[in-house]
Image: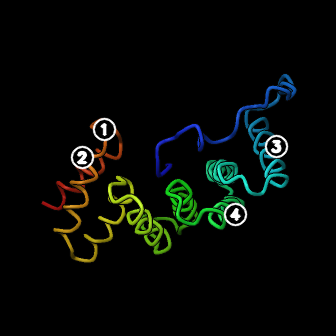
Amino acid sequence: KALHQTTPQNAGPPALPANASPPIAGGSKNTMIQAMVQRLADRMEKTPNDVDGWVRLAHSYNVMGENAKARDAIDHAVRLKPNDENVLLTLGETQKGAAAPGDDTPADFIATMRKVLKIDPANAHALYYVGIVEQKSGHTDQARAMWTKALAATAPEDPLAISIRNQLNAAS
């Protein structure tokens, strides 16, 4: 699951460029997606300062489950814009995706979420995950405050809002 809402700048595999040939009839969807991601990777070799391109590439690799490639791509973006919220959220997504099974709050991921909170103290995803760690550390009041703030910034039907409400109910 992505850590942040999809926006045009991080919408996953890019659309085919207007001058690209259409996919071969009968080709699998997976093959087509892999080809699109490879075209983006090739483009990034030619435009290494395109932060949004690196973020899209990392997100694409995350979706495909290619953790090492995702990490390489997001590391490029982090070097270019180390304090960009979108870059850090994608870094967090990559760190979480590479974590051991069952580890929902790996230390590197939580460190990144804390950095996101320094940039945007109202980031609902960062508040949610850091709140989980605070609760596990015995800081229930701090966790509850973070979740309440996150819930206020989240649409009621958003799956994150449901998770936040569940955490708040469990903490009561």
- Say which element carries label 3: helix
Query: How far apart in space, not on screen, are marks 4 and 1 (Cα)?
Result: 32 Å
Name the kind of residue labelled 2 in the image: Ala
Q: Residues within 10 Å of mark 1 (few under 14, many from 20)?
A: few
- Side of 27 where 86 appears, left or right: left
Name the kind of residue labelled 1 in the image: Ala
- Closer to us: 51 or 97: 51
State the residue lying farthest toward the left: 172
Q: Nearer the viewer, mark 4 or mark 1?
A: 4
Q: Position of residue 99 (x, y in %)?
A: 54, 67
Q: Position of residue 138 (x, y in %)?
A: 21, 76
- Say which element carries label 4: helix
Name the kind of residue labelled 4 in the image: His
CB of mark 2 within 8 Å of CB of mark 3? Answer: no
Query: How far apart in space, not on screen, are marks 1 and 2 (Cα)?
Result: 8 Å
Q: Position of residue 112 (x, y in %)?
A: 48, 68
Residue depicted at 77% across the width and 43% down the height: 34
Q: How many marks?
A: 4
Give the numbered dot on residue 152.
2
Query: How far apart in space, not on screen, are marks 2 and 4 (Cα)?
Result: 33 Å
- Say which element carries label 1: loop
Residue with the mark numbered 3: 39
- Closer to us: 63 or 19: 19
Q: Residues within 10 Å of mark 2 (few under 14, many from 20)?
A: few
Residue depicted at 53% across the width and 64% down the height: 83
Name the kind of residue labelled 3 in the image: Arg
Residue with the mark numbered 1: 155
Residue with the mark numbered 4: 76
Q: Position of residue 36 (x, y in %)?
A: 77, 39
In the figure, 14 relative to 68: above or below?
Answer: above
